[in-house]
Image (cartoon, rainbow, N blue to C red):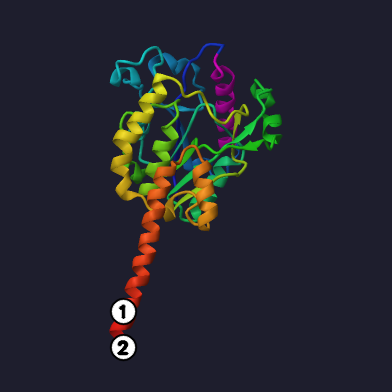
Amino acid sequence: MTSVAHIINPVKVKENSDLFFAQPITFQSLIRAKNQSENAAKFQLLTTQFEEDKSIIPAEFQILSNLEKSILDVNPQLKNRKLPLIKDILDKINEIEKPDFVIFTNMDIAVMPFFYDAIFEYLKKGHDALVINRRRIPSVYSSIEDLPLMYAQLGKSHPGFDCFVIKTELLEKFILENICVGISFLEAALVHNIFSFAENPLLIPDAHLTFHLGMDVLVPRNNDFYKHNRKEFFEKIYPQLKPHFDLKKFPYGALPLPKRAIKWMLNPSIFTKNYLNLEGQNIFQKIKANLDEIRWRILQK
């Protein structure tokens, strides 16, 4: 029986934060999805947090031990925002009986009532990792009483990645360095690890499974936290992952070359330079295979 643990990282925020309204909606959507799931006995709702954030967590969640370190501890140049490291969050899974799969979502990502049952159906097909893109809905809703109306909103697609389902044994291979949550390049770090180490990953770009309040696509990037995550990814993570890259496993890898190139270059979480390198390797491998075939045919004559 496949077991799944969904871990999130709640944070106590002030009323002027978008999370002040979004987070209770996220909590309630996860609880309702579990209560309505045919697979409820197979998964757990978990949190890990800083000590000062525990008071906001609903009773339906199993609270794992507190986080002890933040981005401020690993980069003294950063100030004010005590953001946790994604590797520390995922490591908390070791405090429970190890599940087969781990789900991680950001705290502004709510789920549809059938979310967990859909996850189990995808996993039955043999996928060892899923990356699910959210839907964007208007930010006119602000309370859990509005959830039925939010469910009814089809919304619009979003190109970024913010819901990850990962086979637990893969986490031991992940290279995450000091990437912090809540900042761009978190999604790039996770998705590049997934498509490097998973054998049968699946990108789900446009399903109605998760949603986010607000229609924005790109967030502000002119800040020191963004620069930190970007540097961690390109200077530490990317060079170590590069030998594991395989064009066929990356998003859009199965599409015809022109369409694949357009989608890759338009997606802000996948990088054109990376694509060009992979495409070059792919073309070289095809040319080599054709030349080898000519050699073998000559030898057979």
Within the image, what quadrant is residue 137 found in?
top right
Q: Where's residue 230, x and y in %? A: 38, 30
Q: Disc 2 designates what residue? A: 301
Q: Is residue 31 magenta?
A: yes
Question: Residue 147: which quarter of the image?
Answer: top right
> Within the image, what quadrant is residue 68 found in?
top left
Which comes before the other along the chain, label 1 or label 2? 1
Q: What residue type is labelled 2?
A: Lys
Residue on which the image places disc 1: 296
Q: In this view, does 256 lie above or below 10?
A: below
- Residue 173 at least partly seen: no
User: Please, what secondary structure does the residue beneath circle 2 have?
Assistant: loop
Residue situated in front as seen by the camera: 270 or 55: 270
Q: Tell me which secondary structure the magenta stretch mostly adopts.
A: helix
- Does residue 107 appear anywhere in the picture? yes
What residue is rendered at 54% in x and 27% in y? 108
- Left/right of residue 41 with respect to residue 233 in the rendered view: right
The count of marks equals 2
Tell me the SS state at disc 1. Answer: helix
Magenta-highlighted residues: 17-35
Q: In which quarter of the image is the C terminus?
A: bottom left
Q: Which residue is drawn at 39% across and 18% down?
A: 50
> Is the Cβ of the residue at disc 1 closer than 8 Å to that at disc 2?
no
The residue at the point 35 percent across, 16 percent down is: 78
Q: Residue at x 71, y 35 (%)?
A: 152
Q: Which amino acid does label 1 sit on?
A: Trp
248 relative to 295, above or below: above
Does the magenta run of residues contain 177?
no
Kindly report the distance in space between the C-alpha atoms of the residues bearing marks 1 and 2: 9 Å
Q: From this viewpoint, which residue is outermost toward the bottom?
A: 301
Residue 269: percent from left, percent from top: 47, 38
